[in-house]
Amino acid sequence: MIVALLNQKGGVGKTTLALHLAGEWAGRGKRVTLVDADPQGSALDWSQQRAREHSPRLFGVVGLARDTLHREAPELARDVDHVVIDGPPRVAGLMRSALLAADLVLIPVQPSPLDGWASAEMLALLSEARIYRPELRARFVLNRCGARTVIARETAETLADHDPPVLRTAIGQRVIYADAAQSGRLAFEIDDDGPAAREIAALVTELERIAP
Ligand code: ADP
Ligand code: MG
């Protein structure tokens, strides 16, 4: 399966969730390649930091921030069980290419009612991609949910009928994600049975039900 984390907004958690999804799958014995499609290269930075810390390799990270991604990703997918694409900011050729490459698009959003979750432009690109790839699935994933996000959760339940629907698993606002990013690690390596490790496991389990 090729999963792309996309949102034209920066700072919503594309890289954080891409790394943790890849890590969770790797931990479950899957072969995973993470494609860093962001010209800023934060996933590549993370893997270099990881190498400096001599942490064991969990999955490969390749930089592919170019709009031929949709032709190259299927080739990468041939050698592994899952390809996870950490998407670029901004709506552009790169995002169109990532949309065409993916089987499943995850759109991380911060559950603020004041936030347009995804721009009309991005949703239009998604509809366009579905003309060519009707089987393409898309889901919102709530990230950085605080203790007061119960209200947002209820909104999520009602939004489950919408298109794209919202995943049931929401990811909390947790310092451990920032610590992990900085030290080239993953949350489950810092605390293997903590709330972050558990919600990431739940996220992967939910994804596997959507796209086995
Ligand atoms: P994007 O790739 O969409 O730009 P990032 O994954 O880089 O977003 O996240 C932006 C910042 O927010 C990073 O510093 C990251 O550590 C932090 N962050 C992301 N998700 C969470 C979370 N659930 N809890 C705490 N910090 C988070
Ligand atoms: Mg990023």
Image (cartoon, rainbow, N blue to C red):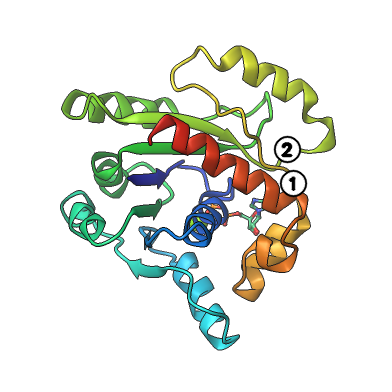
Which kind of residue does numbered mark 1 sit on? Gln
- Circles 2 and 1, Cβ within 8 Å, touching? The answer is yes
Question: Can you say whether 74 is above or below 155 in the image?
Answer: below
* Secondary structure category for the residue under label 1: loop
Question: Residue 135 location in percent, x, y?
Answer: 26, 27
Place of residue 198 in the rendered image (x, y in percent of width and height, measured from the top left): 69, 47
Ligand 1 closer than 8 Å to the CB at disc 1? yes
In the displayed structure image, the side of residue 79 where residue 174 appears, left or right: right
Task: Classify 121 as above or below 199.
Answer: above
Task: Identify residue type, mark 2.
Answer: Cys
The C terminus lies in which quarter of the figure? top left
125 up-or-down from 160: above or below: below
Q: Which mark is residue 145?
A: 2
Q: Residues within 10 Å of mark 1 (few under 14, many from 20)?
A: some
Look at mark 1 in the image and give the residue it sits on. Answer: 173
Task: Using residue 190 as the reference point, say whether residue 120 is left or right of it.
Answer: left
Q: Residue at x 59, y 50 (%)?
A: 11
